[in-house]
Amino acid sequence: RGLATHEMGHGLDLAHAGDSDSWDSSYNSLPTEFPSMGTCSTPSYSILESLEQDDYANLEWRYTSQVNSDANTSFETGSTRFWGLGGGASGTVVSGGASDGSYYLRLYGYGGYLYQTVRVTDPKDMRARVNFKKYYSSSSGQIFYGIYARSVYYPNAASGSCMADAFKNSWDLNNPSVANTTFTYRKGKWASPTTSWQWPDTAEWTDVDSWRGVDARLYIYSYMKYSGSSTYVRIDHARIRNT
């Protein structure tokens, strides 16, 4: 089943990944799950029957030009696997009333933020997209969302090694290095939520084509108030996508 899952990934135009998930946005660490598109050091193909974070992120990167296609925020299960909160924000996954009728995140806290990170190998031009909507019709304010990023370097794999043959550039995806741990702002957008779902893109970030890899982090800040106090805003299908 694991082998079939892997080959089905290629059928969906997915490339190989490293042997473990590249990034966990909630815990700022490398998790131990083995993605289905990994190839080289997997202890057992039976582990690969279910999709892991890199697989979902890969699918999102490839297919999220569609309005409501999303794999990375994981609001559908309420898991914090793909996202975290900061700045005093709180978030509650709520069923019903989402942009596609399923689940959305109710983000609370003036100046608080939601974030998620995805590692992209051989990155191309990218944009951020967020679906958002007022929670109370009489609330006011804005949200800001933007791409923050840092470069990831992959050394060349040893000749004849598994990874040398597994990725098109012969990069060793199992040994990435991050020279600067700071995320730098790239592109963003201010927007005013209304009572209807909106999903405008940020401007395109274009200076990534020469990078070997990138950790792209999406931040969503809420500056919404209701009767002079902090209030909620609905967030759905937040993603950074290939353009």
Image (cartoon, rainbow, N blue to C red):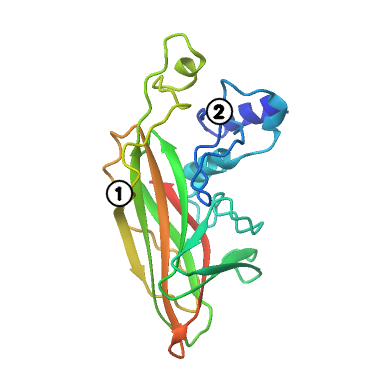
Per the image, the residue denoted by label 1 is 205
* Residue farthest along the bottom direction in this orientation: 227
Q: Is residue 66 above or below residue 138?
A: above
Identify which amino acid the numbered label 1 is placed on.
Answer: Trp
> Is there any visible trace of residue 21 in the rendered image?
yes
Identify which amino acid the numbered label 2 is placed on.
Answer: Asp
**Mark 2 burial class by Cα count in 10 Å: few <14, some 14-19, many 20+:** many
Give the foreground label among 2 and 1: 2
Q: Which residue is drawn at 54% across and 42% down?
A: 59
Q: What element carries label 1?
A: loop
Per the image, the residue denoted by label 2 is 19
Q: Marks 2/1: CA distance?
A: 28 Å
Out of 195 and 183, give the one closest to the viewer: 183
Q: Is residue 163 above or below residue 15?
A: above
Q: In this view, does 160 lie above or below 29?
A: above
Q: What element carries label 2?
A: loop
